[in-house]
Image (cartoon, rainbow, N blue to C red):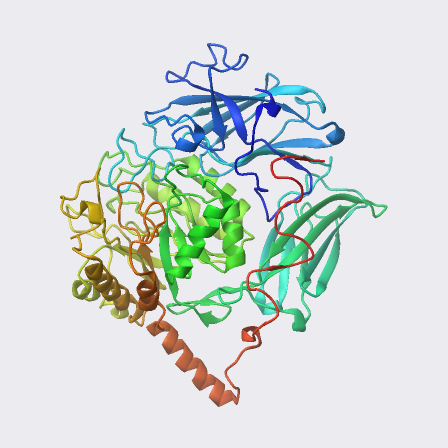
Amino acid sequence: MPADDRTDTPRPEYPRPQFQRDRWQNLNGRWGFETDRSDTGRERGLTGRELSGEIVVPFAPEARLSGVEEQDFLRAVWYRRTITVPPQWAGDRVLLHFGAVDHDATVWVNGIEVGRHRGGFCGFSLDITDAAPAGEPVPVVVRARDDPEAPQARGKQSVRYTPRAATYRRTTGIWQTVWMEPVPQTAIRRPRITPNVAAGAFDVEVPLSANLPGGVVHVRVSDGAGEAVSGTVRADLDLTPRLSLVLPPERVRLWSPADPHLYGLDIELRDADGRAVDTVESYAGLRSVAITGKQIRLNGDVVFQRLVLDQGYYPDGLMTAPTDADLVRDIQLGQAAGFNGARLHQKVFEERYLHHADRLGYLVWGEFGDWGCNTGEGQSTNQRPDASYLQEWLEVLERDHSHPAIIGWCPMNETWQDYGDRITALDDVMRGMFLATKAHDTSRPVLDTSGYAHRIAESDVFDSHDYEQDPEAFAAAHSALADGEPYVNRSDTTGHSWSIGYRGQPFFVSEFGGIWWNPAEAGRPQTATGSWGYGDRVRSVEEFHTRFDGLVGVLLDHPDMFGYCYTQLTDVFQEQNGIYGFDRSEKFDIRRIRAAQLRPAAIEADARQQRAGNDATDGKDGRRPAEAPHPTEEPGSTKGPRPTEAPGPAGGAHT
């Protein structure tokens, strides 16, 4: 299908705002499309002919916005589109980027297979230079396979025809932006930016496609007053050039939910004559995460984590937000209700969501959609994750490392399995994912799994899921935490804990609440496929508020609880236990929900009292420089000399 057959471009914004170049071309829009239920398309010649239908990319064929809206299982689907690399890009390498394709993707350009990728949550890039000469129209063909029976990371996608309880409609094939860009023969790869608050610095690693003899990497950090610091390092000595950029003390401004300040970063690769070979724009926030006893500290302060479970589903786009504004709205809805962050649940959210969380000061835990490996075969062997979990999780860590909004990692969720006498695939893969995370990132805490079957003794954090609806029983369940006996998730059949023992780590209830409310269904019984929530239903909005206040109050008042995560931000299809409706409408009095959460938590109050005593002893006034107001600057703004979005007309070819 010719590129100029598009009438307009969905999701036209630049997809990678923390690693940005000027020249790019958005390939969203109408593509040729064909389902392949028997997965015989290659034998039937689908790589070399026009396809029978069409689809609107980047929406999955199950989504209404795709124009297909297929509800049945799709073992394989095919895409086709004609692209033309702009003539101005001749002499550069051309990269074709896919934001996400579920689950196994193979890509052909001009009849040549240019690459494969496994995993439906993280993107991949392919060099198509040799297959797509500049100025010549060439076909791009994509096959996506999505086996509904195979154990694989599928998140909340239902393995049954009819979604039920906490699983939803499926996503197959392309579901995030497709785009291409030119890069020089020696190019900058994704930088890794790590804040170093103790030193007032950013530690910056700049991987290159190859070392450049005589070349240098130059990095400039800027804020609203212009350049704050810059540095240069040789590009021909170390495989990955690294440098630490120490800010002048008067230019240090910490990133936090109260003041999500972002510095601009310009990164330039220069040749031996000082000429720019490659230039990218980025940004960073200066913030630290640390653990003291059972406290998790942000920039040295105890900040109670009032999190909400966000699953990132939309009625007409499924896992794909219809517009960029929908991503912003979801964060703002959480903040309006009094939450200061979210667990990004059973899905790897797109980069633009994290960009908005960075600039809006919204704390998030980076997670993975690991559901889908439960075989049901044996209580102590039912989880069968494989090597692809590690591969894709490492891609996630690499993509998202530099976002200041991410304050912790959690690669698995609700891995229910008895703790038996044998080492299992779950034990191996969970440990592998934990060690990979710690090896990649030493700046953030890692939780081995959210709820259920903890298996890693060195896990920085411990948690449980508790959907008890009675506040008194809820409080009783968590009353022994101070004695080293937290509430743990147990087998329904044996009553035994699924986890290894607790070792005194920071603890939070990372799922609770899930209070059902849908007035249209109030007179009907709860069903897993109709209208579903956790526990006994409330009978009115007022009863909801009473229960919400009671459950939240138990955790706020617990002196050993560093936070919580309430289920959930919005209704999702039949799971109708959101603070907001699936259409993001208000179901309750949001001001009351906000007020219930914003009183000081016990762990915060204790830390403030301790700090006040220390300050009095030291003769200080208790105020830190980082808390000074900045009345002339907007919170969340990027303090560099650039916009946060890519220049040029949306969706066009920027040459």
Q: Is residue 155 above or below residue 490?
A: above
- Residue at (64, 52) in percent of width and height: 643
Q: Is residue 489 left or right of residue 288?
A: left
Q: How many marks?
A: 0
**369 sits to left or right of 469:** right
* 477 sits left or right of 328 in the view: left
Which image quarter is the N terminus in?
top right
Residue shown at the point (43%, 27%) measured from the top left: 67
Residue 555's place in the image compared with 323, above or below, is: below
Is 65 positioned to the left or the right of 381 in the image? right
Could you say where residue 573 lies in the image, as x and y percent from the top left?
A: 30, 40
**Image coordinates for residue 458, horizontal then vertical, percent:** 39, 57
Up the image or down, 307 lies above or below 158; here it is below
**Quadrant of res 94:** top right
Q: Where, by quadrant of the figure, is residue 564 drawn?
A: bottom left
| Residue farthest along the right direction in this orientation | 273
Q: Position of residue 250 (x, y in %)?
A: 66, 73
Q: Quadrant of the C terminus?
A: top right
* Residue 436 can be seen, yes or no: no
Q: Position of residue 355 (x, y in %)?
A: 54, 51
Instruction: Answer whether residue 517 is visible to the viewer in this image.
Output: yes
- Taking the view exactly as shown, the residue that stands out farthest to the top is 44
Q: Nearer the viewer, residue 75 or 654?
A: 654
Q: In the rendered image, which quarter is residue 109 located in?
A: top right
